[in-house]
Image (cartoon, grey):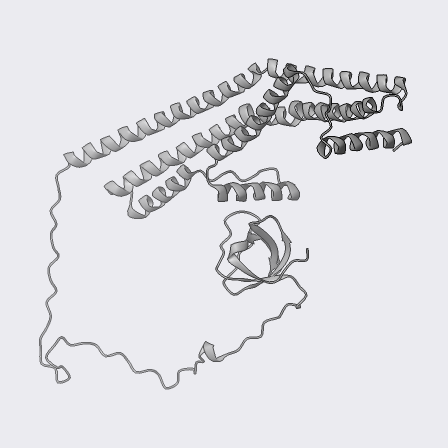
Amino acid sequence: MSVAGLKKQFYKASQMVSEKVGGAEGTKLDDDFRDLERKVDVTSKAVVEVISKTSEYLQPNPASRAKLSMLNTMSKIRGQVKNPGYPQAEGLLGECMSKYGRDLGEDTNFGGALVDVGEAMKRLAEVKDSLDIDVKQNFIDPLQGLCDKDLREIQHHLKKLEGRRLDYDYKKKRQGKIPDEELRQALEKFHESKEVAETSMYNLLETDIEQVSQLSSLVESQLQYHRQAVQVLEELSDKLRDRMNDAQSRPRREYTPKPKPIFDFGEDSHSNGGYSTSMAPPPSRNSEPFFHLATLSFWKPRLSPEQPSCKALYDFEPENEGELGFREGDIITLTNQIDENWYEGMLNSQSGFFPLNYVEVLVPLPH
């Protein structure tokens, strides 16, 4: 940094201390500018909060949301193009119903109805996935672009304006000791930054019809989702009604018990008066000896005490690509901590990630 730059930084720091500690008065900005600044600040907070709440609306399960975020991060690191989707509640319910409906039998009333409802629920999950995609493309992404570009640019202009104000106030307070030309240049730069910041804020607030258009896209996506959901549910309702009418029109079958077996109560010298029973054959004398597994000891390789590791508290079955499965009691080598919920480690030459709450850390990862 040049000498002039260092002097300017010193001037601004001195003026800030004078205002914060000594109570010195700085140059006041006009009320119109302050009003613009307030509205832009509210807009910035609204955009950030709305993006967060919209994501929660689309993906309400925080654990699944965190897991999906971690999986997407891992997919980017590994160069995978296809990312796993959010597990919609309708899809999970549909899979459950379809499974037990098929197990029960589609030829039964209840089993067939379970399959019908399960398939409809899976269709609703697909419709919900389409809603997620539409809202992200037409609502969340444009708002995120506004936050990353326009609002960030305005914050940069306001920060630059504040720095030039402090520089001007410092020189104005020392008028006579500071050359008049230097004071005049500081005032011109202050007004220049004020005009740039004011123009950028004004333009943002005057073009807020774009945000109205984005809200309209959100509502249209929701409307389309509900229309498709109503169509799926109406078809399902008609199908279930036909199933009930068909079941009621069929004659009811009466239960016919099977004939009881007839037992022979012949004399048996070995009987105590009850039913005769067949005796189990005695064990062979030539049978091979066996060993109780509990009496055998098995050697297991031990990890170096310096090696970061953990012990499995429960069985963990992997559900997604990249997850590491293990059994209770397994010792896993720790290689990385993905976030506050997931570790990455190795077991039996297999690498993958797994949840923190399934293991107990033996040797922690170095900080």
Residue 311 versus residue 227 in the image, above or below: below
| Quadrant housing the C terminus | bottom right
Residue at screen point 49% across, 38% down: 86
Q: Is residue 152 left or right of residue 314?
A: right
**Which image quarter: residue 258?**
bottom left
Q: Is residue 20 left or right of residue 168?
A: left
Residue at screen point 11% across, 70% down: 263
Q: Is residue 332 left or right of residue 220?
A: right
Residue 332 placed where, x, y %? 59, 61
Which residue ends up furthest to the top in the rendered image?
206
Q: Is residue 55 left or right of residue 197?
A: left
| Quadrant housing the N terminus | top right
**Which image quarter: residue 303?**
bottom right
| Along the line of sight, the residue nearer the viewer: 29 or 97 | 29
Residue 74 placed where, x, y %? 61, 44
Residue 129 placed where, x, y %? 47, 32
Residue 357 versus residue 278 in the image, above or below: above
**Which image quarter: residue 19?**
top right
Residue at screen point 44% across, 79% down: 292
Number of numbered callouts drawn: 0
Residue 45 placed where, x, y %? 57, 28
| Along the line of sight, the residue nearer the viewer: 212 or 226 | 212
Residue at screen point 55% across, 26% down: 46
| Along the line of sight, the residue nearer the viewer: 282 or 4 | 4
Residue 296 versus residue 323 in the image, above or below: below
